[in-house]
Amino acid sequence: MTGTHDASAGSSAGETPAGEPGRAWYIIGSANPGLLADLAARLEGRDGLRLQRILRTQSGVGGVVVEATPDAIARLRAELGPDFVIEEDRPLEPLTPTEQGPATPTDRGETDLAGDGVVPPGCR
């Protein structure tokens, strides 16, 4: 089961900070769910940062969403190092079709991803 834990009253998916200039939402991720869980527990009360949401997956914490100032994010990046990824939360851009069109199966059930007659390893 997956889901979210809303850490702030009144916020909803897709919402951005209102009335607070210089603040934005950021997604924090790590390949290690344990590190993310520990981080989520330590974020409350930090200057310039507010925990908004904890994203949960079957293996545990899958991500953390915070509202923060750029300065707070810079401090957090310096503290956390390479085990974490921090990106500004923004709407996904719609997928656009490629010039070559969609991948098509060959007559043997393989998938020619680029449309050039070459089937990558693992697509056989």
Image: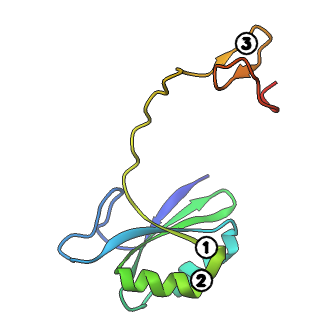
Residue 12, numbered circle: none
> Is 97 in front, or is 33?
97
- Locate residue 103, reporting x and y percent: 61, 22
The image shows residue 87 at horizontal and vertical percentages of: 47, 66
Q: Position of residue 73 (x, y in %)?
A: 44, 80
SS at mark 1 in the image: loop
- Closer to us: 116 or 58: 116
Residue under label 3, please give it: 106
**In this figure, which residue is indicated by the disc labeled 1?**
84
Q: Earlier in the sequence, mark 2 or mark 3?
A: 2
Q: Is residue 80 left or right of residue 26?
A: right
User: Which residue is at 81% across, 32% downward?
Assistant: 122
Q: Earlier in the sequence, mark 1 or mark 3?
A: 1
Residue depicted at 21% across the width and 77% down the height: 21
Residue ID at (36%, 57%): 13
Residue that badge 2 annotates: 80
Q: Are marks 1 and 2 in contact (CB under 8 Å)?
A: yes
Q: Amino acid at mark 2?
A: Leu
Q: Furthest residue to the left?
A: 19
Q: Is residue 30 above or below residue 110?
A: below
Is residue 84 shown left or right of residue 10?
right
Q: Secondary structure at mark 2?
A: helix
Alpha carbon separation for disc pair 2 and 3: 46 Å
Disc 1 and disc 2: Cα gap in Å? 6 Å
Q: Position of residue 52 (x, y in %)?
A: 40, 72
